[in-house]
Amino acid sequence: MKHNLNYSPLKGFNSFKKAYELAKKYRFDNLFIAICNKPTNLLIKGKEPNPNKIYVGISVPKKSFKKAVVRNRIKRLIRVSMRNFIRLNQSNEQLIGMQAILITWHGQQINNPRQIKLSDVETQIYKALENILNKKKKIETNTSIID
């Protein structure tokens, strides 16, 4: 069955805070990813979340990247990568079961926005999310065997 998942930004301070509290957290080289699975009691701007959307929150710390230009470029590249990943994995059951994904990018110091490319960000995002989806799939198959 083909689902029509869409990317949507996670907005609102309380939404981020609640999502971090409810999320399962994963750490990779330059990434920290927190994932909230459906169903949650997460409210997006005080409303129930849309079941056909995956809410994505992106954070790039000022402590690691001093220039706003660099932080904004990294955020933009992560957004594009996430949109592409969701579009390519529409039928993945583990992805369909996700409500919110929070991504924090940590990396080496960058002073010029041209130093980071889409291919750099996209490969790391894809590897990390595929790793998480594979872990979730293994856990689900192991629990179904036990039942």
Image (tube, rainbow, N blue to C red):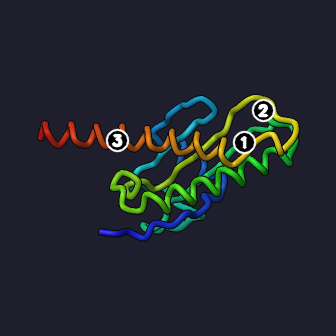
Q: Is 9 situated left or right of 117 in this image? A: left
Amino acid type, residue under disc 3 in the picture: Lys
Tell me where residue 103 appears, x and y as whole percent.
60, 44
Secondary structure beneath dot 3 equals helix
Residue at 36% over, 61% down: 91
Quadrant assignment for the N terminus: bottom left
Residue sitting nearer the eye, 75 or 45:
75
Q: CA distance from mark 3 to mark 2?
A: 30 Å
Amino acid type, residue under disc 1 in the picture: Val
Quadrant assignment for the C terminus: top left
116 to 50, vertically: above or below: above
Residue at 13% over, 36% down: 146
Amino acid type, residue under disc 2 in the picture: Ser
Q: CA distance from mark 3 to mark 1?
A: 26 Å
Tell me where residue 12 appears, x and y as whole percent.
65, 57
Q: Residues within 10 Å of mark 1 (few under 14, many from 20)?
A: many
Residue holding disc 1: 60
Secondary structure beneath dot 1 equals loop
Q: Is 125 situated left or right of 105 in this image? A: left
Q: Are marks 2 and 1 in contact (CB under 8 Å)?
A: yes
Q: Residues within 10 Å of mark 2 (few under 14, many from 20)?
A: some
Q: Quarter of the image holding residue 115?
A: top right
**Mark number displayed over residue 136:** 3
Residue holding disc 2: 64
Q: CA distance from mark 2 to mark 1?
A: 8 Å
Q: Is 140 situated left or right of 60 in this image? A: left
Residue at 42% over, 66% down: 51
Label 3 vs 2, first from the N-terminus = 2
Q: Is residue 40 visible?
A: yes
